Image (cartoon, rainbow, N blue to C red):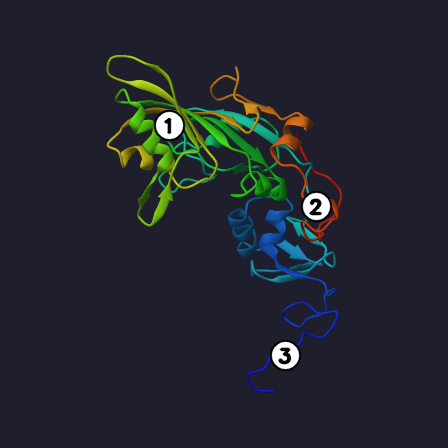
C-alpha cells in the first residue's frame, strides 16, 4: 500500500537479496583485505595488466568477485594471502607515515628495508614531526579493532611544550575546544616535569583526529617542541631504539584488539577468494 511499510521477505538482507547470497567485492579491495598489498598498489597492478582472475587478465580494479569463487594470480603466480604480521616501530622524527610520498620525502617504510616482510600497513598515523610508537600489520580486521573510536585502546603521548602550564590550562585541555567543527579534547593531561621556559606533559587520548594534540594546544596558544607517542593501551614503547621494530607477542597483539563476538563467530570479514597457501617472507 502506498505510504505503508513494506515488510522484508524472510531470509533476505535489507537490499532484498537472499541473506546467504555470496557477497561481492572489488578486485583491488580483495587483494588489499587479504594483506597481499595496499589497495592503491593493487589498483596499479590491475591497471598494468598484472592480475588475472580465473586465467583472464582483468584491467578494472573494481571488477566484482564473489566470496571464495575465483582464482587470482599476480604476474602468473598465485596471489596467496601471506602470514599475518603485527609490528611495533619506534618512528623517528622526519619520516612520513605513508607507503608512497608524492613529494619524495622519506617514509616510515625506510625502517623496514631489508626485513623480508610482506606488505604491511600502518595502523594509525604519526605526522612527520612526531615520533614514537607506530603499529604495522597486514591484518585489516585487527587494525580496525585497534582504531575503533569507541572500543580501541587509549594512546599516551609525552609532549614538550613551549611554556610552563598552570592547573587551569591542564583542566582546559581536558574540557576541550571546538576547532573547525571538531571537538578536540584530551582524556587526561598531567605535568611530567618543567623548567623555566618549557615543560613536558603526558597527554592521553581516547579518540583519534588528525593532528589532534597539536591543534588542541594551538587553540590555547601553546607550541609543541616535541611529540612522542609512548604507549597504545598497555603496550609501551619502552627501550626500543629509534628506527627499530619488533614483532608483537601474541599476548600483546590480543590485548590491543580483543576479538569481537562477530569475529569469533567468523562474521568479522568475508572469506577471502584467495588461495590459503602462505607466501610470507618473514
Instruction: Please count the marks in the image.
Output: 3
- Mark 3 or mark 1: name the one nearer the start of the chain: 3
Q: Position of residue 278 (x, y in %)?
A: 73, 39
- Mark 2 or mark 1: name the one nearer the start of the chain: 1
The image quadrant of residue 68 is bottom right
Asked whether the beta carbons under mark 2 and mark 1 sit within 8 Å of each other, the answer is no
Residue on which the image places disc 2: 261
Q: Nearer the viewer, residue 127 or 232?
A: 232
Q: Nearer the viewer, residue 201 or 190?
A: 190
Q: Along the horizontal axis of the image, is 167 left or right of 62? A: left
Give the quarter of the figure containing the N terminus.
bottom right
- Mark 2 or mark 3: name the one nearer the start of the chain: 3
Q: What crowding class fits label 3: few (fewer than 14 Cα within 10 Å), some (14-19), or many (20 or more)?
A: few
Image position of 265 with respect to 155: above or below = below
Residue at 68% x, 61% y is 23
Distance between the Cα atoms at labels 3 and 1? 57 Å
Q: Position of residue 273 (x, y in %)?
A: 71, 53
Distance between the Cα atoms at labels 2 and 3? 31 Å
Q: Along the horizontal axis of the image, is 279 left or right of 219? A: right
Distance between the Cα atoms at labels 2 and 1? 40 Å
Residue on which the image places disc 1: 94
Residue on which the image places disc 3: 6
Q: What crowding class fits label 2: few (fewer than 14 Cα within 10 Å), some (14-19), or many (20 or more)?
A: few
User: Can I make out residue 187 in this image?
Assistant: yes
Q: Along the horizontal axis of the image, is 67 left or right of 197? A: right
Q: Along the horizontal axis of the image, is 3 left or right of 107? A: right
Image position of 39 with respect to 147: above or below = below
Q: Label 2's element?
A: helix
Give the quarter of the figure containing the C terminus.
top right
Image position of 131 with respect to 142: above or below = above
Q: What crowding class fits label 1: few (fewer than 14 Cα within 10 Å), some (14-19), or many (20 or more)?
A: some
Amino acid at each position: 500500500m502506498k505510504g505503508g511499510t513494506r515488510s522484508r521477505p524472510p531470509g533476505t538482507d535489507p537490499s532484498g537479496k537472499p541473506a546467504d547470497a555470496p557477497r561481492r567485492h572489488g578486485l583491488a579491495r580483495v587483494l588489499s583485505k587479504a594483506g597481499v598489498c595496499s589497495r592503491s598498489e593493487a589498483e596499479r597492478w590491475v591497471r598494468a595488466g598484472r592480475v588475472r582472475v580465473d586465467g583472464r587478465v582483468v584491467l578494472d580494479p573494481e571488477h566484482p568477485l564473489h566470496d571464495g569463487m575465483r582464482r587470482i594470480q599476480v604476474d602468473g603466480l598465485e596471489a596467496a594471502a601471506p602470514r599475518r604480521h603485527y609490528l611495533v616501530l619506534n618512528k623517528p622524527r622526519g619520516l612520513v607515515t605513508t607507503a608512497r610520498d608524492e613529494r619524495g620525502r622519506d617514509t616510515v617504510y625506510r625502517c623496514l628495508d631489508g626485513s623480508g616482510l610482506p606488505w604491511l600497513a600502518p595502523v594509525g598515523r604519526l605526522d612527520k614531526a612526531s615520533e614514537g610508537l607506530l603499529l604495522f600489520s597486514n591484518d585489516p580486521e585487527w587494525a580496525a579493532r585497534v582504531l575503533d573510536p569507541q572500543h580501541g585502546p587509549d594512546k599516551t603521548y609525552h609532549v614538550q611544550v613551549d611554556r610552563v602550564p598552570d592547573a587551569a590550562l591542564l583542566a582546559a585541555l581536558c574540557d576541550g575546544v571546538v576547532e573547525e567543527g571538531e571537538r578536540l579534547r584530551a582524556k587526561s593531561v598531567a605535568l611530567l616535569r618543567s623548567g623555566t621556559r618549557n615543560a613536558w606533559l603526558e597527554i592521553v587520548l581516547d579518540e583519534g583526529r588528525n593532528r589532534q594534540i597539536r591543534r588542541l594546544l594551538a587553540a590555547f596558544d601553546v607550541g609543541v617542541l616535541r611529540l612522542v607517542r609512548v604507549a597504545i593501551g598497555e603496550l609501551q614503547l619502552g627501550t626500543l631504539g629509534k628506527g627499530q621494530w619488533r614483532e608483537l607477542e601474541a599476548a600483546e597483539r590480543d590485548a590491543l584488539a580483543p576479538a569481537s563476538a562477530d569475529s569469533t563467530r567468523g562474521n568479522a570479514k568475508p572469506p577471502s577468494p584467495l588461495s590459503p597457501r602462505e607466501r610470507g617472507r618473514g
